[in-house]
Image: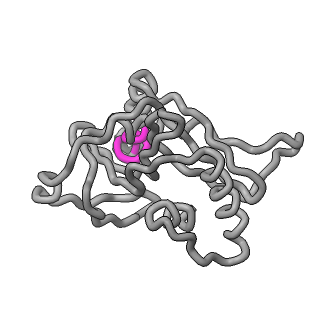
Amino acid sequence: HAACEEYVITGVRPEVDAEVEPYLAQFDAWCDEFSPEYQAAEVTVFAPEYGYAGTCDAFLTVGGVRTIVDYKTTRKSFAKNGDPTGPYPEVALQLAGYRYAELAAVWRPRRFSQFRRRYYLLSPEERALAVPVPEVDTGLVIHITPEHCHAYPVQCDEPIFDSFLAVIDAAKFVFDQSKTVIGQPLVKG
């Protein structure tokens, strides 16, 4: 995943170890076939109104269609029934969140991870430098395995964004509110 992003950002194929080489070869073949035009890669987007941020893998155009992109890599190229593996539908929620975030950072924001959650540090000065998230026509997930690379169109429109917001609300309950909703047991006294 990181090697593909480095390749996109720099345009120079990086030296990678033998385990990563098949993924990069598959991605390279896909790029040769579809000639994507990259507008940006590794773009941090944020939505102050809703309190979330994330890093979108790319904004690119394929065949005249403007897309917001997420790369998904897996070692498993084929399912037990022999069909090629593909992306999970939850990527639609992720892409909708990116697509409908209000602002994009034009710098590399400071970030850290704690308890499997990523946090972005954006000062008021940095927020003032942000630009609107680029408009897109749809989403695209590029699924890369050692044996194939396929790009799948992904619905990430307003109804999917509404579902994304519902998932955020549910997560707030799980991570925050759930810790305070149960009181102490009753005691007879």
Judge whether residue 174 is colored magenta.
Answer: yes
- Most common SS among magenta residues: helix
At a point 15% along the width and 54% down the height, the residue shown is: 129
Using residue 141 as the reference point, say whether residue 30 is left or right of it: right
Rendering coords of residue 29 (x, y %): 68, 55
134 or 165: which is nearer to us?
Answer: 134
100 in relation to 40, above or below: above
73 in relation to 135, above or below: below
At a point 52% along the width and 39% down the height, the residue shown is: 62
Extreme residue in the right direction? 81
62 or 117: which is nearer to us?
Answer: 62
The image quadrant where one finds the C terminus is top left
Using residue 66 as the reference point, say whether residue 146 is left or right of it: right
Rendering coords of residue 155 (x, y %): 51, 28
Rendering coords of residue 23 (x, y %): 68, 61
At a point 46% along the width and 52% down the height, the residue shown is: 57
Rendering coords of residue 131 (x, y %): 21, 46
Q: What is the span of residues highlighted in magenta in the rendered image?
A: 169-178
